[in-house]
Amino acid sequence: MKNCLLILFTSFVISCNGKTPPEPIPKKPKNIIFLIGDGMGLAQIYSGMVTKGDALNIERFKCIGFHKTYSFNNIITDSAAGATAFSTGEKTYNGAIAVGPDSIPIETILETAEKKGLSTGLVATSSITHATPACFIAHVKSRALDEDIASDFLKTDIDVFIGGGSSFFEKRTDGKNLLNDLKAKGYEVDTTKNEIISSKAKKLVGLYAATQPDSATGVRGDILHKATQKCIDILSENQQGFFMMAEGSQIDWGGHANKQTYIIQEMLDFDKAIGKALDFAEKDGNTLVIVTADHETGGFAITGGSIKDKKVEGKFISTYHTGVMIPVFAYGPGAENFTGIYQNTDIYKKMMEELGLKK
Ligand code: MG
Ligand code: ZN
């Protein structure tokens, strides 16, 4: 029995890493790059694979698990409760931004990392105040409170954030201009894609749309993978390590709109960011990359198409989220701990443990 377990354990480690670990004590990562494809279920991923007809970066992962997405009060989560589970380890009500079911703020992994001297960053293809990125840095009762969420960015020492939503910082009902406050705190504030990508700043705010950015086929173009790379470049200067989250925000919006072309384009765009993260992690050797989604959107199913013609025919059963389990892909030191089936809140716990962080 002992031998059997040992063999199982050994083959498990080998299957995840592709080789036997050189030392008996598992290595811990210094950095975590956490990538969220909002609304990205298996059909969204696979329709991207079929359409590209060539391996996606997401196929480079060997350690794969599943998480249960349900929220505190609903079998169907929203992105706010979903991201709060990842950022704080607590299930909460739909709409909550890093507050518990009692509306009391809970410290996030990004805040803990920042306090312990790691560099931190957020990247999104929605406004940076949108539910998913907001849950890593803000604490408000409702995801609709974009201006309050924007104010919370000033309460941390996050090093980089890039997304849409400049109007929530500078055209506010309280008349404040938070972009000036950010500049006073030492950030370079860039509002165009080119400025952001070519920035040499150590502390960077990149707000490339007034509210929500357009799709990957519009003006937004390829900013996601370039902003992800920029964020990695800046944060990796810190020898103590870093934590960052980058989101392919609009896979979800394609699902809500029941538009499979939109889903596929956003999936392929997100996959390029995954590629940047993996390329860095492969070279660095001290970086754990995690890719997952908060939930599936649309009840999207592949009902036809052709592998040869790289075509997918899909159907939707909903214009909202569904409650299925969601895959988790992990690469790097600690990746084997992300295999199996567990709660969305366990992703927070595993990431904290891997970074050696305690609240
Ligand atoms: Mg989102
Ligand atoms: Zn959604």
Image: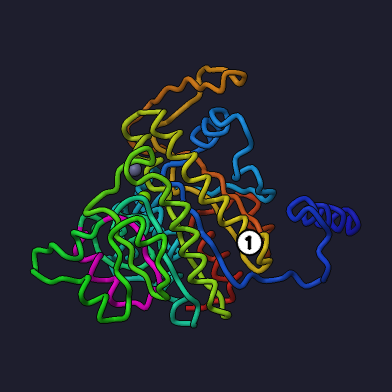
Residue 100 visible somewhere in the drawing: no
Q: Which range of residues does the magenta coloring cover?
A: 145-164
Coordinates of residue 240 in the picture (x, y in percent): 56, 80
Image quarter where ligand 2 lies = top left
How many labels sit on residues? 1
Determine whether, in the image, residue 248 is placed left or right of residue 64.
left
Q: Which residue is labeled 1 in the image? A: 281
Dot 1: element: helix
The picture quadrant where one finds residue 218 is: top left
In screen coordinates, is 117 left or right of 100?
right
Q: Is residue 286 magenta?
A: no
Q: Quadrant of residue 141?
A: bottom left
Residue positioned 86% across, 58% down in the render: 6
Residue 237, percent from left and from top? 53, 76
Q: In the figure, is residue 287 to the left or right of 198?
A: right
In the displayed structure, 216 sits above or below 2; it is above
Quarter that holds the N terminus: bottom right
x%, y% of residue 310? 56, 23
In the rendered structure, which amino acid carries the disc numbered 1?
Answer: Ala
Can residue 329 be seen from the camera position used here?
yes
**What crowding class fits label 1: few (fewer than 14 Cα within 10 Å), some (14-19), or many (20 or more)?**
many
Tell me what residue is drawn at x 26 percent, y 76 percent: 183
Q: Nearer the viewer, residue 310 or 130?
A: 310
Q: Is residue 184 left or right of residue 221?
A: left
Render colour scheme: rainbow
Pinpoint residue 97: horizontal percent, then vertical percent. Answer: 31, 61
Q: Quadrant of residue 349?
A: bottom right
